Amino acid sequence: MFRTSSSLMVCLTIVAALTSSGCGGGGKPKTYPVKTVVLVNGAPATGASITLHPEAGEWKTQFRNRPAGKVADDGTVKFSTFSPQDGVPAGEYVVTIHWPAGGDRDALHGEHQSPERPNPLKLTVAAGSNDLTPIQITSAKLTRKK
């Protein structure tokens, strides 16, 4: 009985060590504050969900987390990656946007929901504080009421 308990403890210790280190990586990448605004047809995309998909880098496949945020009434977005509003790791990103328009509908008709779409929106996050240019979308198909 004691031998089984010892073996179990050793296995659990190894699993915990691998999990906390990212299975051989150097842990979670450092995140940086990002300040941007999301506008659709010149107005804040209030309530839209923004997700950043890394284009490259070790953490693209190592972690399931994707930096994401919700657009506030003034159009600003605060991003969270590993914890609330912790920022975004440095790198190049493809931006996806889902703007709820009632039920499962998207106000942008899915135009910006896939990171594989042609001519995706992109942004770059550098080490340090990032004050990025606004993400501006023009959509003739917009189904939201102003």
Image (tube, helix red, strand yellow):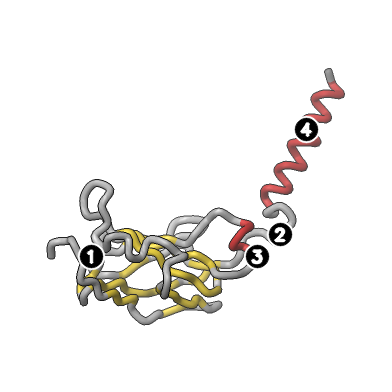
Residue at left 32%, top 65%?
111
Q: Compare residues 138 and 130 and report the one nearer the observer.
A: 138
Q: Residue tagged by mark 1?
A: 73
Q: Residues within 10 Å of mark 4 (few under 14, many from 20)?
A: few
- Kind of residue indicated by mark 2: Gly
Q: Which amino acid is tagged 4?
A: Met
Residue type, label 3: Glu
Residue 115 sits in quarter: bottom left
Dot placed on the residue nearer the N-terminal end, 2 or 1: 2
Where the N terminus falls, by quadrant?
top right
Q: Crowding near pointer 1: few (<14 within 10 Å), some, many (20+)?
A: few
Q: Which residue position is annotated with label 4?
A: 9
Q: Dot 3 corresponds to which residue?
A: 58
User: Disc 4 or 3, which lies upstream in sequence?
Assistant: 4
- What's the CA distance linking mark 4 and mark 2? 23 Å
Q: Where residue 9 appears, x then y in whole percent?
A: 78, 32
Identify the residue at horizontal 39%, vertical 74% (top origin): 35
Which numbered disc flags the more N-terminal residue, 4 or 1? 4
